[in-house]
């Protein structure tokens, strides 16, 4: 079975010179993105997260969001995106609800 994370690594092999993601600060090719995603996935797993654990992502639209999203998927984690414009109390509510009901382990 193929998932989006596996497709990223396949595209990185097939299109090594093509841009994958860019924002106001930087641009990354597919291989650069794949390398960063693999390192993030390893780091998340090294922190004790296990496949199926949830990770709350609350970031503005940026390259790092894409890296974290694919890093979660590569590690077998469930990314839970939250609007970065929410008030901190609203993000806390989402995180606490997830902690009680869905085992959210990490906040980014």
Image (cartoon, helix red, strand yellow):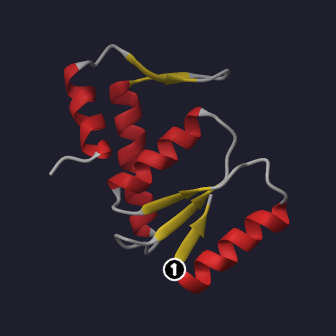
Q: Residue at x 62, y 34 (%)?
A: 62
Looking at the image, residue 76 lies above or below residue 38 = below
Viewer-side residue, 82 vs 73: 82
Viewer-side residue, 32 vs 60: 60
Residue 57 placed where, x, y %?
60, 55
Say few, some or many: other residues with alpha carbon within 10 Å of mark 1 (under 14 / 14 to 19 / 20 or more).
some
Q: What secondary structure is found at the residue carrying circle 1?
A: loop
From the image, which quarter does the C terminus lie in? bottom right
Residue 17 placed where, x, y %?
32, 13
Looking at the image, residue 77 lies above or below residue 28 = below
Q: Residue at x 74, y 73 (%)?
A: 93
Looking at the image, residue 35 lies above or below residue 58 = above
Residue 58 placed where, x, y %?
67, 53
Residue 45 placed where, x, y %?
39, 66
Considering every residue shown, the one lying at the far bottom of the view is: 100
Image-based side of 80 in relation to 7, left or right: right
The number of numbered badges drawn on the structure is 1
Looking at the image, residue 30 lies above or below residue 60 = above
Q: Residue at x 31, y 45 (%)?
A: 5
Image-based side of 47 in relation to 62, left or right: left
Residue behind mark 1? 103
Considering every residue shown, the one lying at the far top of the view is: 17
Name which quarter of the figure residue 8 lies in.
top left
Q: Residue at x 26, y 18 (%)?
A: 15
Viewer-side residue, 8 vs 26: 8
Image-based side of 34 in relation to 97, left or right: left
Image-based side of 7 in relation to 42, left or right: left
């Amino acid at each position: 079975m193929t998932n989006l994370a596996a497709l990223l690594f396949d595209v990185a092999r097939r299109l090594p010179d093509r841009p994958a993601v860019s924002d106001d600060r930087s641009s990354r090719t597919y291989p650069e993105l794949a390398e960063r995603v693999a390192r993030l996935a390893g780091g998340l797993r090294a922190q004790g997260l296990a496949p199926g654990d949830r990770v709350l992502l609350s970031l503005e639209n940026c390259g790092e969001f894409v890296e974290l999203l694919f890093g979660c998927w590569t590690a077998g984690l469930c990314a839970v995106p939250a609007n970065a414009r929410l008030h901190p109390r609203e993000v806390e509510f989402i995180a606490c609800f997830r902690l009680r009901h869905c085992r959210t382990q990490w906040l980014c």
